[in-house]
Amino acid sequence: MVSVKSVVSHPSMEDRSKKQSILLVDDREENLVVLEVILKDLDCNLVRARSGQEALRILFGHDFAVILLDVRMPDMDGFETAEFIRQRQRSKNTPIILITAADVSSDQIIRGYSAGAVDFIFKPFVHQLLAAKVRIFIELFSKSEKLRVSEERFRLLVESVKDYAIFMLDTEGAIVSWNLGAERISGYRQKDIVGKHFSVFYRAEDVQVGKPKNGLKMAVAEERFEEEGWRARKDGSEFWAHVVITPVRDEEGTLRGFAQVTRDVTELKKAAQVVSELPTRLLQSQDEERQRIAHELHDSTSPALVGALSRLYMLKDRAKDWDTKTSTALQDCLALVENVARDIRNLSERLYSRALEQVGFVSAVRSHAEAFGKQSGVRVELDLPAASGRFPQNVEIVLFRILQEVLPYIQLHSNSQLAVIRFSSTKQEHTLEISDRLGKMDVGVPSPPERRKTALEIRLAGPEERIKQLGGKLSISTRSGIIIRAVVPVHPNSVSSEDLIEP
């Protein structure tokens, strides 16, 4: 049974959080009293044990900053007790100071250190020396305990995180720690992965070009390395990862390893890709819908209108003997049907150009410009290549849509009543320029983004988005005249070199 005086009590949880504990082990009451008197000013919890067995029982349930252990005790002496203390996981690192008589032999001192003692105190005690030695161990224990608690909290935090793979690497990139999130994301258990090089997460081609090593080098040079890329799981599947690698250094600045945080952002990448594709899909759906409406409008109305016109012309041949009022009404009906047929044809062509589908962009531009000039009265100047080849359908559609939007705008808003259309194509890019004046076209400096968009910019918002999706650029200027320039890059697999139009 543990003997405790009023100032010597088993510490409660609250007391232990404030004070450190010292275990005093001696079979003689007077020795325990002396130790308590010497150490009372340290403001620690002083716990007594009258034998080695009693000390071991106490150590089952409590942690101590230091143990003062008398060597000469019956049944189990201090050397044996120290050996048992060191064998227990909970107390294997607790400092043990052996107390013995001054005539102890050198063999006993060696045995004491071998049993796990960190120091000796000889009787009779030098009070100041004993208190100073114990105070040093108390301070060391307090610091190590704070560090241990902090590390334990951090370890629990890291190990409990499931959405992030958080692990440590040594200076060469070998994995030295692992958390639950890393296991969930990669499929590797801790026992399977610790000790392996972190390049196991990279694609074979990335390892061949030295991507893992370069990442560590950049982390050292920049104090941080961040990237997104494909990583491999244990089962061979891949995921899109956001990776941050940070060098870990000691107080002298020496590199001790790396901390890596990896997050599986595959779903975010898929979502971003879907969002980025929405404008393209929307524009594609619009084109398909315009094409469907144009075909249905043309195919459903043309036979009826042709039939109506045929019968009206037949009546016109027979109307020589009719009265003037009836003959005039017939002429009006004939003109009205012809206008309706022309408007439907123009609307159908505006929705989807059959010429563009049949003969290609350059020929469609010529025919459309000629028809527009006759109907609008706007003089159209063309600077087009003589040869006409075919481009990818999406390129032809968006460039032709720009032409369809800009020419009516020039008719309504330009004072010159002139439209100049230039087109050129090289192995690098296609360029369409439309202006209401002759001479060199210069779009100039773009306007500030906060400025309200002009009517023309609003009309060209759809084609501009499609141009961006194709990797090109649409420039619009209405400050001194109307100038439009659309540039679309030629992608390697989009068109063969034989199909290119030479300027």
Image (cartoon, rainbow, N blue to C red):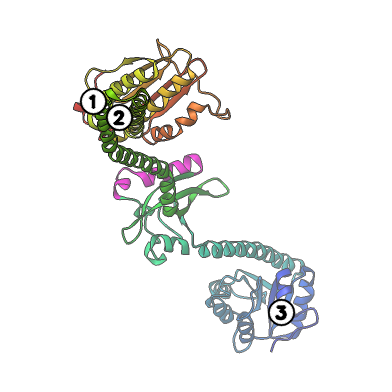
Q: Residue at x 40, y 43 (%)?
A: 282
Q: Which residue is mark 2?
A: 490
Q: The residue under label 1 is which amino acid type?
A: Leu
Q: CA distance from mark 1 to mark 2?
A: 10 Å
Q: Residue at x 40, y 61 (%)?
A: 194
Of residues 254 and 287, the one drawn nearer to the viewer in this rendering: 287
Q: The residue under label 2 is which amino acid type?
A: Val
Q: The residue under label 3 is which amino acid type?
A: Val
Q: Earlier in the sequence, mark 3 or mark 2?
A: 3
Q: Which residue is mark 3?
A: 47
Q: Secondary structure at mark 3?
A: strand
Which one is in front in this view, the residue at disc 1 or the one at disc 2? 1
Q: Is residue 127 above or below residue 429?
A: below
Q: Earlier in the sequence, mark 1 or mark 2?
A: 2
Q: CA distance from mark 3 to mark 2?
A: 85 Å
- Main SS category, magenta section: helix
Of residues 220 and 464, the one drawn nearer to the viewer in this rendering: 464
- Magenta range is 204-224
Q: Secondary structure at mark 1?
A: loop
Q: Secondary structure at mark 2?
A: loop
Q: Residue at x 39, y 66 (%)?
A: 191
Check residue 211 for magenta coloring.
yes
Q: Which residue is mark 1?
A: 500
Q: CA distance from mark 1 to mark 3?
A: 94 Å
